[in-house]
Amino acid sequence: GQQVMQIPQYQHVQEGEDFTTYCNSSTTLSNIQWYKQRPGGHPVFLIQLVKSGEVKKQKRLTFQFGEAKKNSSLHITATQTTDVGTYFCAGAGAGSYQLTFGKGTKLSVIP
Amino acid sequence: DAGVIQSPRHEVTEMGQEVTLRCKPISGHDYLFWYRQTMMRGLELLIYFNNNVPIDDSGMPEDRFSAKMPNASFSTLKIQPSEPRDSAVYFCASTPSELLLVNYGYTFGSGTRLTVV
């Protein structure tokens, strides 16, 4: 079955440093989504990427979808304490509504 | 909209007891998903429904787990009998069928934290 791998598992950064998490799928994806889960909370949708090579930005967050539609990344510029949480990627196959989630990257920001 | 509503928020039960988790999806969302989250295994899809019909239940761990969606506004996940290894956070999520056409993801409920002792 489809597997989605995400690295690193944990990342500790000083406030103001950049952060990147990477996602790789064992199969070609139709789309990839990113979610953020705050400690004790639930996953919250951030963005969806559907096109090969697509790049989207949300303020300090930059999302990329690979040319082969098998990998993706999330980059945060100049992290803030409000960025703390676990970031998940989730991929779906062609025509599918079923998302397979990566294990997530837990981000800690040291003030 | 109140979002996806799950109840109870917390459940502590003894091994062997029946547990029922409840979910009310967002009105108009025709897909409903049940996920389980643990530290070891992350977010696992248990089952999902489309227009109240179960589409894929291959993630349901064993016969002790069952899920129903009697109408568009209500779904249950039942564990009978419960075991300590079922302890986890159970999330319900919903999404409309326009998911693939617009920038719209799953909307998750706040989850039910289940502890089986």
Image: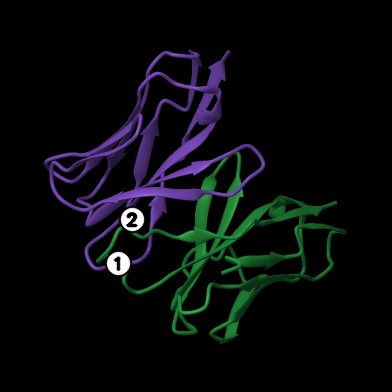
Chain colours: A purple, B green
> Residue drawn at (80%, 71%), measured in percent from left and top?
B18
Query: Looking at this view, is A17 or B79 the one in front?
Result: A17
The disc at residue B23 is none
Name the residue carrying label 1: A96
Q: Residues within 10 Å of mark 2 (few under 14, many from 20)?
A: few
Which of the 4 quarters of the picture holds residue B91? Answer: bottom right
> Residue drawn at (56%, 73%), measured in percent from left and top?
B25
Task: Provide the chain ID for the residue under circle 2.
Answer: A
Q: Is A30 placed left or right of B4 in the picture? A: left
Q: How many marks?
A: 2
Give the vertical position of A79 relative to B110 (above or below). Answer: above
Q: Is A74 placed left or right of B21 in the picture? A: left
Q: Is A70 placed left or right of A108 in the picture? A: left
Give the vertical position of A94 relative to B54 (above or below). Answer: above
Which mark sits nearer the N-terminus, 2 or 1? 2
> Residue drawn at (17%, 43%), measured in percent from left and top?
A54
Which residue in the rendered view is the most extreme toward the bottom?
B70
Q: Residues within 10 Å of mark 1 (few under 14, many from 20)?
A: few
> Residue drawn at (35%, 22%), measured in percent from left and top?
A77
Which of the 4 quarters of the picture holds residue A66? Answer: top left
Task: Provide the chain ID for the residue under circle 1.
Answer: A
Picture coordinates of residue A67, whole percent (x, y): 11, 41
Query: Looking at this view, is B61 or B48 the one in front?
Result: B48
Picture coordinates of residue B115, whole percent (x, y): 79, 52
Picture coordinates of residue A69, whole percent (x, y): 18, 46
Picture coordinates of residue B104, whole percent (x, y): 36, 60
Name the residue carrying label 2: A1
Q: Amino acid at mark 2?
A: Gly
Q: Amino acid at mark 1?
A: Ser
